[in-house]
Image: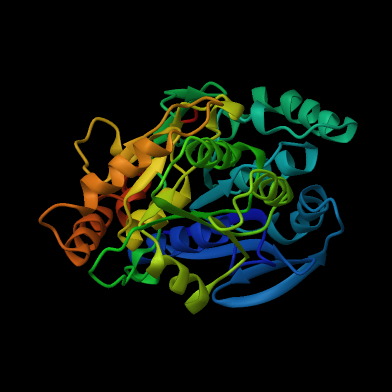
Amino acid sequence: MKLLYLSTWDFSNEKFDGVCKKISAQVIAFVKNEVEVDIIYIKDGMIIYRESGTDRVIGKVGNIKKTPAYIKMYKYVKNKKYDWIYNRYGMMDTFYYRVLKQLRKNGARILVEIPTYPYIFEKPKGFFYGLFFAWDQGYIHKLKKIINRVITYSKDDFIFDIPTIKIINGINLSDVTIAQKNDGLDDSINLLAVAYMQPYHGYERLLRGLKDYYRNGGKRNVQCHFVGEGPEKVLYEKLAAQYELRNHVTFYGALSGRKLDDVFNICDIGVCTLGGYKKGLHLSSELKSREFLAKGLPIVSGIEIDVLSNRKFPYYLQLSNDDTDIDIIKLIEFYDKVYHNQESIGEIRKAIRSFAQEYIDMPVTMLPVIEYMRRGDTPIA
């Protein structure tokens, strides 16, 4: 089977971007299942077409990347024949639709992955974003004519009147080393948040909770380690100063490789998204939860984690999915329950990593898609 992974995601910040890592892991999963893969993506303002292992620049893009990319890539793919197209969904427009329609006409069966559904809550404010969203809405009713299946992380059986294939997010575990914190506990509880900080991460809840804890006489040494950049970082820094938390909060900026591993190695608990309610989400398949589990860290989350739903997993604490302050005492009790038992830190890390290997390694999470492709299903809904 020959597949084109069609994406207009920007790989310019590949080392720090979780979506880039996910796309690369999906490509590896396809290859491991004997699928020949070409890929189109954007990097450093250029549209890159990797065909038969060779990269070729097929155009340039400006600030509005997606639409110009589809306009320019059309002439390069209009005569290409693939068995399958795997497309990470962006807002639909005339040129995007034309590319998919032409590839369908050439005989390809098309799979479209929608990372977040419904995605209306991700629509940025502003006149032009409103126009793009209206453009998208004008085309989605046509998609059932050309798309075979929608890949979703939601519980929806149909999206845009198209049958879905339900999967969960995965990562390439071979790229992630287990955290190596030495055995032996001190009085510190080290919490780790790694993200491109957006409003929906909701880390202000954690900072407000720390403020409440210490103003009410809290004694345990809780340390918050924030890794990453993003538009909300300024707010978090401002709150940490306002709440007099300088001795309990550290901001590192974006890290990768050994420097990121060094921070993981000193931390005890991974903090997942705390603001899912802002996007109307009640179930999460976020990549960061996968990375924490692959690293062997217990996790806390303000939204239900899909892979842990209805499972008795002792290394997971579910918090409320609203704007209330995080109860630091609950985090301390969770920490004590996990670490003050007969298991060593090394054993805890290995148990969590083993779970990750079984359930969230990308070749495992992509199996429903691979199996559908192997069946060769062709009907359009």
Q: Is residue 216 above or below residue 196?
A: above
104 and 201: which is toward the camera: 201
Q: Whole-percent x and y of residue 61?
A: 83, 60
**Horizontal arrangement in the rendering, residue 356 relative to residue 154 (left or right):** left
Q: Quadrant of the image for the N terminus?
A: bottom left
91 and 104: which is toward the camera: 91
Q: In the image as oriented, which residue stretches furthest toward the left?
A: 342
Q: Can residue 170 be seen in the rendering of this structure?
A: no
Q: Is residue 301 above or below residue 364?
A: above
Q: Can residue 347 be seen in the rendering of this structure?
A: yes
For residue 89, what is the image quadrant? top right
Q: Whole-percent x and y of residue 112?
A: 54, 41
**Horizontal arrangement in the rendering, residue 226 relative to residue 283 (left or right):** right
190 and 57: which is toward the camera: 190
**Horizontal arrangement in the rendering, residue 305 relative to residue 131 (left or right):** left
**Residue at 67 percent of width and 44 percent of height:** 239
Q: Whole-percent x and y of residue 177?
A: 35, 71
Q: In the image as oriented, which residue stretches furthest toward the front?
A: 217
**Residue at 50 percent of width and 42 percent of height:** 214
Indicate how the structure is coloured in the image.
Answer: rainbow
234 and 121: which is toward the camera: 234
Q: Is residue 356 above or below residue 127?
A: below
Q: Whole-percent x and y of residue 25?
A: 45, 62
**Residue at 51 percent of width and 37 percent of height:** 209
